[in-house]
Image: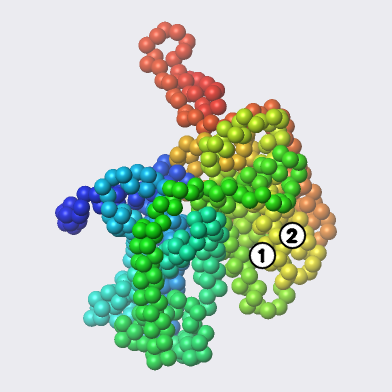
Amino acid sequence: MKHIITRLAEKLPLEFRVLYGQFLLRVVDLEALSLEGDVTGLLGQMAGILILYGVLTTLGLLIAVGRLSGLSAGLIPLLWKTQQSFLSTTMLVAGLIAVISWDNIFPDRRDVMVLGPLPVRPLAILLAKTAACGAVLGIAVLSLNLPMSLALSLVAGGIPHFPRNFAVYWWTTAAASIFVYGAVLALQGFMALLLERRWFLRLSAVTQLGAFAFFLASYFLEPGIGAPAMTVAAADQGMLNRWPSFWFFAMLHRLSGGLPTALDGLARRAWTGLAVVVCAAAVSLALCYLRTMKKTVEEPDLMPGRRGWAPRFGSRLQTAIVRFSVRALARSRQHRVVYAFFLSAAFAIAVSTLKAELTSGVRRPLTTDLMMPTFVMMCLSVVGLRSIFSLPVSLRANWILQVTQLRASEHYIAATRRALLLMAALPVWVVVALLSLGYRPWPHVAVHLVVLALVGSILTDLSLVGVSKIPFACSYLPGKSNIQYMFWAFVVVFVPIAMEFSNYEQRAIRHPRPCAVMLAVLGTMATGVWAFNRRRSKLAALYYEELPTVVITTLGLNSGPLRAPIEMHGTGEAEIHPS
């Protein structure tokens, strides 16, 4: 099989193969998301996580089918629910990949400057970029759906109908993924065509974050599918017309031959939407490569801001650092993508909590169902923003801040702390305060908000221990940031701690004395970590250049006392490791 694929690939034009390999390495910002900048490591871990999810869900389906053996009345609702759920999950994955690889399929400054003088046709560039983005999307969809496609195709029709059901499932899955991915491409393409370059750059950041929020909100607020009779009744009332996952669910049953008449309209919507999205994406891509390539060279990627009133965040230095951080995050695609990776999980938790509140319709007591997710949201927001503080926005910003350092380092470190509090901890606290309006009693809610504020302060100070640099103004060594390690540390360490603390808080807020002790302990911890950082900052020196670690290892041939490896750190300090 590998030999056949290699022979087919060799028949492709050489320029296409070279461009495809290069563009595949740039589908995602590898310096921030991958293992030491290795695209195979990133794709392998992504596929492994999706395969694990698919296998576990498939095992759950097979166990449920085994319990319902001989009960056709219970088997059909189970199959319908599983099919619609996996179509919805596949569309969510496709949408998140489209947002993470934002703008990568369109020509950028590097493409124009490097490939423009070469005899490379724009069509070859377009096809290579499309193939690279399609490869990442295909790996994700295949990894997620392969185990489930085998199980559903076998359970739905048995061995005689397995080939047809398998082909129909994969056609529908591919169509749903292309629909979502193509919709994002069409939106970006027509924005680039209709708007001036400077307005496109300004709105691109807002649109990207809005797309993240839209896909997650649609996934968590989407109604679940019920019994066939209830689904048909909902389709008759038009309640399912706004959810594209139900369109492709109807397409699946239309192609397999078991579609109720009431779902014909949904299937037609799927075919129509797929055709419109594919045509719109193709037209917008072609026009962008023909008409907007000059704009990418004539105007910079980071547009200068307009002068006008802006809020102050303390002293002039603190205000300057906070404004610089906000604008750097808003204008840089790399920083937005990485931070949106963390915010997407936090936003998903908030939407899940809001959905439970909307469906209940009554004032609920404050329980761990709200407490524990709020702690997780705070951790994700603070850690996510801290992880991108080390990524430079521009080398010019690095040098400007170096030559304008007129105050002691402790003032800059204090401004960095304030930026992290205002940009990460405060927004989460405000969202939680709004979600808490549906909970009672008010004294318990107020105590939890105070506890959350103290936890946010503790997390902020812990994340800044030993940090002596300004956000977005330090050179970066690829491979130092690793989201996979952060993810597992978060799951293994922070989540269990948050669970236990939520249970303790629920018991403590019911009694005044334990509640006062809890607040006093948290306040002492927050003050202690803050004082520790403040004391270290008085002796710290800001550094802007990240230097690679240099290890000098001696052969041990001399008779002197120096027979150990010497390690030179990025800060200029040397460390001798005894042999």
Left or right: residue 514 versus residue 248 is: right
Q: Residue at coordinates 68% horizontally, 42% vertically from top-left?
A: 320
Quarter of the N terminus within the rendering = bottom left
Sequence order check, earlier mark of 1 and 2: 1
Q: How many marks?
A: 2
Considering the image in quadrants, where does the C terminus appear? Answer: top left
Give the vertical position of 501 relative to 169 (above or below): above
Marks 1/2 in contact by CB < 8 Å: the verdict is yes
Q: Is residue 81 above or below residue 381?
A: below
Q: Point out residue 536 in the picture as x, y percentages from the top left corner.
A: 69, 31
What's under tag 2, amino acid-wise? His
Q: CA distance from mark 1 to mark 2?
A: 10 Å
Disc 2 secondary structure class: helix
Q: Which residue is mark 2?
A: 448
Residue 51 quadrant: bottom left
Q: What residue type is disc 1 on?
A: Leu
Residue 473: percent from the left, percent from the top? Answer: 57, 38
Query: Is residue 509 or residue 128 the one in the foreground?
Result: 128
Residue 502 at x, y = what percent? Answer: 67, 58
Residue in front for this viewpoint, 548 or 440: 548
| Residue 370 marker | 1
Q: Which residue is depicted at the point 45% across and 44% down?
A: 31
CA neighbours of label 2 inside 10 A, class few (<14), some (14 to 19), many (20+):
many
Residue 405, relative to residue 521: is it above or below?
above
